[in-house]
């Protein structure tokens, strides 16, 4: 009895007190089922359990075990430790997730910059093995693309020289012709060939023109283009304005707008330019011409393609103006589309997302 009391009392926080035999509960439950009996016999508000032990000499000892209420707060030290553990776990998980997502975000930004920046920076090779492999593969792809573009630039420069030289010789020979009608006709042919060579080189040069991004004053750019057409006697109006500068390639944007306005003036007698500035910069160029068939709205963006009704030398052009304009729009991450207006005429819609 003494050994049992000494073992259970101080070690388990059990109150040990002797009791009379009459105080022993009338219900006798085998030991293995005691816990289940206690849980069923005592309601939730019971504050303690009485465990009765009867010895061979007839003495009885009752062990009173205090019951911790279900809603009792945790000890303060335990609550603090658990809170710190949870915070530490959150920090570790955040750092682990960031170490994975950060290289992926850098890869996404680098992929988005391809075609916009002439020489984007290479990715840092770090992170998990799979991320390092992806960064190396992307850097290798960029190097190959740059070598290809550099090679193409050199080829185009050589082509420009080789094509212009014989055209210049032909023009000199045409001037020696005595027939003025033949001289004028061949001169127009040479003018068309030179324009085609010039615009073809401009189109093929495309992404690798080397022009960096800069802050472009779109309002001033449109005023400049409008003035150039006014000097040629063309009717060009501009309504609306950009609220802030646009970050892009100034010469590329000027070429795009010039081609769109020239197309409107050539086939629609005038060009009305509408500027809308919101989440993206929208520039609409409308003309008063007959429009084009719905089936041709996309095909006219193909290089050297011209609508059948405009395939004459006087007004047909080279078939590259719209292709170059769309190429410039796509370099800036934007789009260029055409639609026939209900009241007549054609509208070119240039959409340029804001780039910061």
Image (tube, helix red, strand yellow):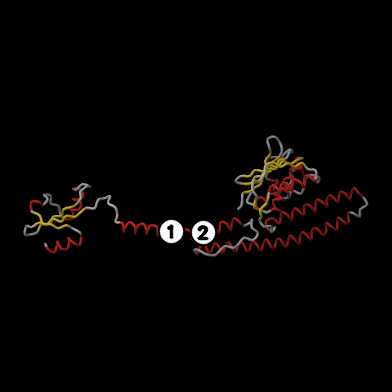
In screen coordinates, is 76 left or right of 223?
left
The local secondary structure at tag 1 comes to: helix
**Farthest left residue in view:** 57
For marks 2 and 1 on the same chain, the one whose residue lies earlier in the sequence: 1
Q: Position of residue 106 (x, y in %)?
A: 55, 59
The residue lying toward the viewer, choosing from 275 and 198, is 275
**Farthest front residue in view:** 76
Q: Between marks 2 and 1, how big is the CA–CA gap? A: 14 Å
In screen coordinates, is 116 left or right of 154?
left
The residue lying toward the viewer, choosing from 33 and 47, is 47
Q: Is residue 238 visible?
A: yes
Hey, which quadrant is residue 5 in on the image? Answer: bottom left
Residue 102, numbered label: 2
The local secondary structure at tag 2 comes to: helix
Label 1: few (<14), some or many (≥20) within 10 Å?
Answer: few
What is the quadrant of the N terminus in the image? Answer: bottom left
Q: Do the residues under discs 2 and 1 have CB atoms within 8 angstroms? A: no
Residue receiving disc 1:
93
Q: Position of residue 128 (x, y in %)?
A: 49, 63
């Amino acid at each position: 009895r003494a050994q049992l009391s000494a073992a259970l009392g101080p070690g388990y926080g059990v109150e040990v007190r002797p009791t009379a035999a009459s105080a022993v509960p009338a219900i006798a439950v085998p030991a293995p089922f005691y816990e289940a009996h206690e849980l069923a016999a005592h309601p939730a508000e019971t504050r303690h359990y009485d465990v009765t032990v009867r010895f061979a000499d007839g003495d009885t000892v009752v062990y009173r075990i205090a019951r911790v209420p279900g809603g009792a707060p945790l000890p303060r030290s335990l609550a603090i430790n658990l809170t710190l553990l949870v915070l530490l776990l959150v920090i570790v998980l955040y750092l682990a997730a960031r170490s994975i997502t950060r290289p992926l975000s850098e890869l996404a930004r680098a992929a988005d910059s391809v075609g916009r920046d002439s020489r984007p920076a290479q990715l840092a090779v770090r992170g998990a093995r799979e991320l390092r492999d992806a960064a190396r593969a992307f850097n290798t792809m960029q190097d190959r693309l740059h070598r290809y573009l550099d090679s193409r630039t050199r080829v185009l420069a050589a082509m420009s020289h080789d094509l212009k030289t014989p055209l210049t010789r032909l023009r000199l020979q045409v001037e020696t012709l005595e027939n003025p009608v033949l001289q004028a006709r061949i001169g127009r042919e040479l003018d068309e060939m030179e324009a085609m060579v010039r615009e073809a080189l401009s189109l093929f040069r495309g992404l690798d023109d080397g022009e960096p991004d800069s802050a472009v004053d779109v309002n001033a750019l449109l005023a400049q283009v409008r003035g150039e057409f006014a000097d040629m006697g063309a009717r060009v109006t501009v309504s609306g304005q950009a609220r802030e500068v646009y970050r892009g390639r100034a010469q590329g944007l000027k070429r795009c707008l010039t081609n769109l306005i020239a197309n409107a003036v050539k086939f629609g007698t005038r060009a009305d330019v509408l500027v809308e500035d919101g989440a993206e910069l929208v520039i609409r160029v409308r003309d008063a011409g007959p429009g084009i068939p719905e089936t041709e709205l996309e095909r006219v963006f193909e290089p050297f393609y011209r609508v059948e009704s405009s395939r004459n030398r006087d007004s047909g052009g080279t078939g590259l103006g719209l292709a170059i304009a769309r190429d410039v729009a796509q370099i800036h991450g934007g789009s260029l589309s055409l639609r026939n207006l209900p009241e007549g005429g054609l509208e070119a819609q240039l959409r340029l997302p804001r780039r910061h």
